[in-house]
Image: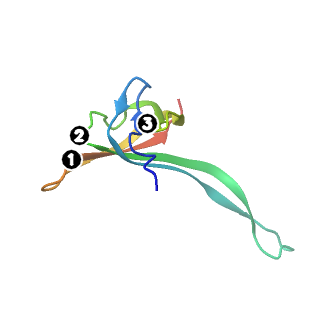
């Protein structure tokens, strides 16, 4: 099993600012399901509703990112490829944690913003 994730970085608020070292990334794109059925239907069928998107990352160490900050969230993968995860993002939460004999880590949650 390879270690393709090792060395991956997240850039925010611009591609010139890296948040490292990244220890975890979760990019979630889900949506509300819309049940469609009528009086003659044998069962429900579904349509995709509005997308509910988030990116959650954990970085080792403290982070200077603050709640309410805005910018682009981009992943630069270990193999050199990259993906824009959210082009217009806002930081919803920042949690810094630490415990005895363990490194400090920061968990940051990004969500899309309207402008």
Residue 60 falls in image quadrant: top left
Query: What residue is shown with label 3?
Result: 90
| Quarter where residue 10 is shown | top left
Label whose residue precedes the other's in the sequence (3 or 2): 2
* Residue 24: mark: none
Distance Cα–Cα, label 3 vs label 2: 19 Å
Mark 2–mark 1 CB contact (< 8 Å): yes
Where is residue 90? Give x, y as percent.
43, 36
Is 105 placed left or right of 83 in the picture?
left
In the displayed structure, 100 sits above or below 92; it is: below
**Foreground label between 3 and 2:** 2
Circles 1, 3 touching at the beta carbon (< 8 Å):
no
Q: Secondary structure at mark 1?
A: loop
- In the picture, the disc for residue 104 is 1
Q: Earlier in the sequence, mark 1 or mark 3?
A: 3
Give the x, y percent position of residue 35: 71, 64
Cβ atoms at labels 3 and 2 below 8 Å apart: no
> Could you tell whether 42 is left or right of 21 in the image?
right
Front-most of 1 and 93? Answer: 1
CA separation in Å, label 2 and label 1 = 6 Å
Q: Residue at x 48, y 34 (%)?
A: 74
Image spot of residue 52 (x, y percent): 55, 49
Q: CA distance from mark 1 to mark 3?
A: 23 Å
Q: Residues within 10 Å of mark 1 (few under 14, many from 20)?
A: some
Residue picked out by circle 2: 62
């Amino acid at each position: 099993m390879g270690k393709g994730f090792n060395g991956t970085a997240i850039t925010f608020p611009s591609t010139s600012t890296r948040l490292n070292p990244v220890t975890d990334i979760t990019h979630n794109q889900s949506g509300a399901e819309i049940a469609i059925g009528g009086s003659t239907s044998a069962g429900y069928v579904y349509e995709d509703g509005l997308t509910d998107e988030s990116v959650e990352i954990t970085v080792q160490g403290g982070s200077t990112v603050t709640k309410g900050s805005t910018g682009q969230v981009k992943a630069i993968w270990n193999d050199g490829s990259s993906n824009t995860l959210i082009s217009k993002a806002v930081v919803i939460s920042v949690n810094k944690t630490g415990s005895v004999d363990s490194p400090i880590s920061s968990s940051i949650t990004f969500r899309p913003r309207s402008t």
